[in-house]
Image (spheres, rainbow, N blue to C red):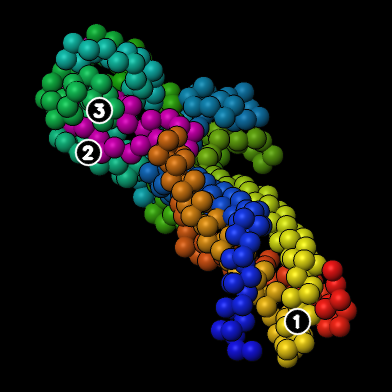
Amino acid sequence: MSPLSVLRVALRALLRNKMRAGLTTLGVVIGVGAVVAMVAIGEGAKAQVQKAFESMGTDLIVVLPGSQNFGGARGGFGSGQTLTWDDLRAIQSELSAVRAAAPQLRTNTPVLGDGNNWGTQVMGTTAEFFVVRNWAVELGRPLQASDVDGATKVAVVGKTVAEQLWGEPARAVGDVLRVKGVPYEVIGVLTPKGQSPMGMDYDDVVLVPAKTFMTKVQGGIKQHIPGSILIAAKNGRESARTAQQVTALLRDRHQLADGDPDDFSIRNLAEMANAQQQGTQTLTMLLMAIAAVSLLVGGIGIMNIMLVSVTERTREIGVRMAVGARPVDVLLQFLVESLTLSVIGGAIGVGVGVGGAWLLTAKFGWPTVVRPDVIAVAVGFSALVGVAFGIYPAKKAAALDPIQALRYE
């Protein structure tokens, strides 16, 4: 028989038992749908994490005062007093691998603008901050060196702050913002960056000159930096080497002997991003493995139904062999039936998986990414399952003795 004839006979046999065929494909539908949906969730999480780290700057290095093992900040910001303004200037001037460096002084406090109150994070920094964080202003202008040197009372606000206080970000520029009762002129609104991997709103921030922050918010200029130092490496791919250079410089400046623990801590965002991506990839693979089990269960269901079908159609097989059908024709017929069931189930499963991913995004806001190659692999794997689990029933049908098959009741 020609391949087309085999396919036609197989389809006719399946259409005679539509309900059974539909129930048989259900396991494959669930398996493929689960694979597509689970991978879409994993890829969406991976893309969201990547986007969040990119918004922070993958070349970003954070230097914190104190050490995890040396009486300072334990993984936090600004708890120690081991970083100085001279350290910052040395990092800027002595390390060729550093593109820019800026202080980051922070506090959470209510602010007032246009008659409205809003609790936000107020941050003292310098003009280099915008280079380090790769952060532009959407309206107005950023902080400048003259603002920092002159300790002027100006502020750049995040979009969330502008919307909460003024409704429209454009209305914020030129207006007055009060921080702890002190008036600041709003000179700019930051371009929105969204959320961090931990869910923190980057746009919920107010930036003021570092000297202004210390005198008006913290109550006086200090020799140490009451916060952290942000560093941008010139080459993001060599941020680990840049972090090593920063460590060596600070240990030398702080006169730490060999064997002494660092009195500061360094966080390399490129390494953190890679670790997060590996974790997300592992989760995606785990979800795929769980979903693949469902697909294998669907394959077992196909095999069981095909075995039942062989038993029920024993006389039909005997008649076909009696009129000239070869064992290979019978084998191909049952194999094509099994393959057709699994491919149809795979195609429906793709629709279910894509629809499920879309529903998760629409209803719950979960980020999902449906990759065409995953769809192709899922359908291909479902076809492979159909062939693998259809071989045994097909061989059993092809091995029937025509005379015994005709006598079967």
Q: Earlier in the sequence, mark 1 or mark 3?
A: 3
Residue lying furthest top: 181
Above or below, 37 against 168 in this view is: below
Q: Is residue 41 left or right of residue 144?
A: right
Q: Amino acid at mark 2?
A: Val
x 78%, y 74%: residue = 315
Above or below, 175 against 312 in this view is: above
Q: Which mark is residue 157?
A: 3
Q: Which of the 4 image quarters holds residue 397?
A: bottom right
The crowding category of the residue bearing disc 3, from other C-alpha atoms within 10 Å (few below 14, some 14 to 19, many at least 20), is many
Confirm whether residue 407 shows in the render: yes
Q: Amino acid at mark 1?
A: Val
Q: Amino acid at mark 3?
A: Val
The crowding category of the residue bearing disc 2, from other C-alpha atoms within 10 Å (few below 14, some 14 to 19, many at least 20), is some
Q: Tell me the element at label 3.
A: strand
**Which quarter of the rendering shows the N terminus?**
bottom right
| Front-lying residue, 97 or 237 | 237
x 58%, y 24%: residue = 72
x 40%, y 39%: residue = 362
Q: Is residue 380 left or right of residue 167?
A: right
Q: Is residue 300 left or right of residue 359?
A: right
Read off the magenta span: 182-208
Q: What's the distance in space between the residues labelled 3 and 2, CA to CA?
A: 9 Å
Question: Label 2: which residue?
Answer: 137
Question: Label 1: which residue?
Answer: 319
x 29%, y 33%: residue = 126
Picture coordinates of residue 396, whole percent (x, y): 82, 75
Q: Earlier in the sequence, mark 3 or mark 2?
A: 2
Q: Earlier in the sequence, mark 1 or mark 2?
A: 2
Above or below, 263 against 91 in this view is: above
Q: Tell me the element at label 2.
A: strand
